[in-house]
Each structure stands twice: as C-alpha cells, then as structure tokens.
Amino acid sequence: MVGAVGGAMMVNDERSFQTQLDDTNADFNISSALSSHDDLKNQANVTGVVMNSNVLMIGQAPNSMLRDKAVRTVQELKIGGKIHNQIRIGNPTSFTTRSNDTWITTKVKSRMLSEDGLDVTNIKVVTENGEVFLIGLVARQQADLAVEVTRNTAGVRKVIKVFEYTDS
C-alpha cells in the first residue's frame, strides 16, 4: 500500500521526476553535512527540508554562531534555491516535544487527506516545537486551504507558509 501511495504522489507531483530525485538527494546531503560538524551534531537540533530546490532550515541552536554555521554549511552545498532560515535560538527540544511534533504532523496530514478539494501531493508538512511549516509548489487556493486545515488542528501553535505558487 505504501508503494502505491508513494507512486501516486510521484505521478501527481508538480515537480519533475528529476527535481524530486534532486530534492531527496539534497535532504540526504544536508543531513550528512550538518552531522559532519561535531558542534552542530552535539549542541544543536537542526535539519533541512528541501522542496523544489528550496531549503527550509528548522530546529534550535544554542547561539547565533551555531545557527549561522548551520546555514553556511547548507549554503556551501549549492542546492540552487532559496534557504529559509527558521532555526530558533534556544536549547534543543526534548524527546517528548519531538514526539508531540510527530503526532501533530500526522494529525495535520490526516486532516489534509480527508479535506475535499485539497491536493496534498505537493505539500510537505513539518512540525518543530508546535510550529507547523507548510512547504510546497501549489496554487494559492490550495495553499489557503492547507493553512486553514492546519490552523484548526489541535496542538498547532503557529503556521508558517513556505510555498511557491503555481499561479500568478
């Protein structure tokens, strides 16, 4: 079943197959690059999510020096799109908070899937410390609907849009 859903999403995705592959490789390269720095790996909780060559950087760093180092590390990869820096200065979130974030993401995705008229194939949902980031390549009407569904999901503290729009 998972393969069928994944295949269907790939077919309906606005991005070309090559762009989807490049985004997946970039996700992996970001993780590898960030984890190659002991200070980032041990003191921060930072990750990057790629959609259509744009990078959303999220998590926590204890100071601006480490936050900036994480951003520079990703810039050096030359992925090609914009880097949206949403790394917060503070202590890394706890396991409990990260588990709750996973639950929020699951609830948002489930609600989106059951929403008539919403095509979720082009939207990534990422939750970090109760903030839900929506990233994707969508029409404005789809973005507005996704935000409304997300905003009305229990546990969501804030919704941040990182969309590119397919219409003008």
Image (cartoon, rainbow, N blue to C red):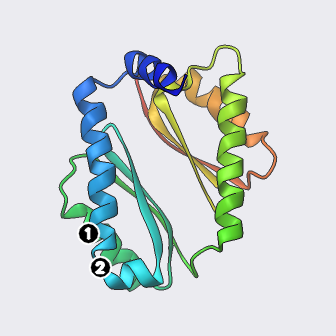
Q: Considering the image in quadrants, where does the N terminus appear?
A: top right
Residue 14 seen from this side:
yes
Q: Of the residues tagged 2 and 1, which is closer to the observer?
A: 2
Give the answer, above or below, for where 86 lies relative to 161: below
Q: What residue is drawn where x is 21% and y is 47%?
A: 80
The residue that mark 2 highlights is 37
Report if residue 167 is visible in the image. no
Q: In the rendered structure, which disc, 2 or 1, sits on the residue that comes first in sequence?
A: 2
Residue found 73% across the figure and 42% down from its top: 151
- Nearest the viewer among 157 and 17 is 17
> Residue 67: image x %, image y %?
40, 76
Q: Decide if residue 142 is on the left or right side of residue 86.
A: right
Total marks placed: 2
Q: Percent position (x, y) of residue 16?
A: 27, 23
Most extreme residue toward the front is 1
Q: Amino acid at mark 2?
A: His
**Identity of the residue drawn at 68% across and 53% down:** 158
Residue 160, disc: none
Q: Secondary structure at mark 2?
A: loop
Residue 7 picture quarter: top left
Q: Which residue is mark 1?
A: 73
Q: Is residue 95 left or right of residue 64?
A: right
- Quadrant assignment for the C terminus: top left
Reply above or below: 59 against 28: below
Q: Quadrant of residue 24?
A: top left
Q: In this view of the protein, which residue sits in the foreground, 24 or 161?
A: 24
